[in-house]
Image (spheres, helix red, strand yellow):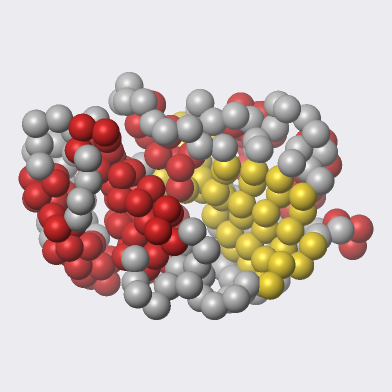
Amino acid sequence: MVKGLDTFREAFAGHADRYVLIGGVAASLTLEEAGIEFRSTRDLDIVLIIEALDEVFCAEFWEFIKRGGYTERQELDGPSKRYRFGKPSDERYPVLLELFSRAPDGLTLPENADLTPVPIDGEISDLSAILLDDAYYSFIVAGRNHTNDLAYIGVDRLIPLKAQAWTNLSHPDCVEEGAGRKSNKHLKDVLLLSRLLSAESDVDLPESIANDLRSFLDVMPSLDVDMKAVGLRGVTITEVAERIRSAFKV
């Protein structure tokens, strides 16, 4: 279980229509439901649902930040609004919160929020860039699971999303800090999540996302991965790629 997730769940049990958890925390929830151990993850990646965002949620979120005693409060300058809250004084709270918003104005926070502006050099190639794409944003929002007072995406959304994050981070022109480490993490997550796919898996993708996933799968068999290290014994990376192709019909 991700540290602080229960505290987050309790605080926002009535607001599951205003956000969706993606990234490592969503993968952790999805895999744990199937009894599969996932790598430790300390941060909560949260996509704000701009169509449902209101002042009540913004106010309650800010109270959550204050109660947790978060001393790191950053607003990242980029094409989309991103916020990072870290170093809580209360150990019951998540270690790091990363919020993504497609709304130009982002969250409505009080004037004394004391956010530190953080300039970003170059393009951001990870999740925030993907969320600027209308097809991906709609795909994520439409695929939300609501379980145990949490909203998060499952394997049907995580695999295409992480595959595209790997593609962006692996591009020769990518200048994002730690791109190699992040891309390897996304690749291993795709492999691990593929264990949840079966012969009956049948996922419809929007055309643009299907094309992105197809391009990733074309490259995937050539990648050097220790399959045993990700819990896939007796199976090749090519076989995993074909399993994903079959499930997503690409």
How many marks on residues? 0
Q: Residue furthest top?
A: 35
Residue 199 placement (x, y as % from top left): 9, 38
Residue 164 placement (x, y as % from top left): 33, 62
Please give the name of the residue rendered at 48% of the width and 72% of the height, measured from the top-left corner. Answer: 175
Q: Quadrant of residue 139?
A: bottom left
Q: Can residue 157 be seen in this snapshot?
A: no
Left or right: 185, with 14 as reference point: left
Q: Can residue 184 be seen in this snapshot?
A: yes
Residue 238 placement (x, y as % from top left): 9, 49
Nearest the viewer among 164 and 152 is 164
Please give the name of the residue rendered at 10% of the width and 42% of the height, measured from the top-left corner. Answer: 236
Left or right: 25, with 116 as reference point: left
Q: Quadrant of residue 234?
A: top left
Please give the name of the residue rendered at 35% of the width and 31% of the height, measured from the top-left corner. Answer: 31
Q: Quadrant of the C terminus?
A: bottom left
Is residue 160 positioned above or below 145 on the image?
below
Residue 219 placement (x, y as % from top left): 17, 63
Nearest the viewer among 113 and 121 is 121
Please give the name of the residue rendered at 38% of the width and 48% of the height, measured from the top-left corner. Answer: 185
Q: Quadrant of residue 160?
A: bottom left
Is residue 91 positioned above or below 186 on the image?
above
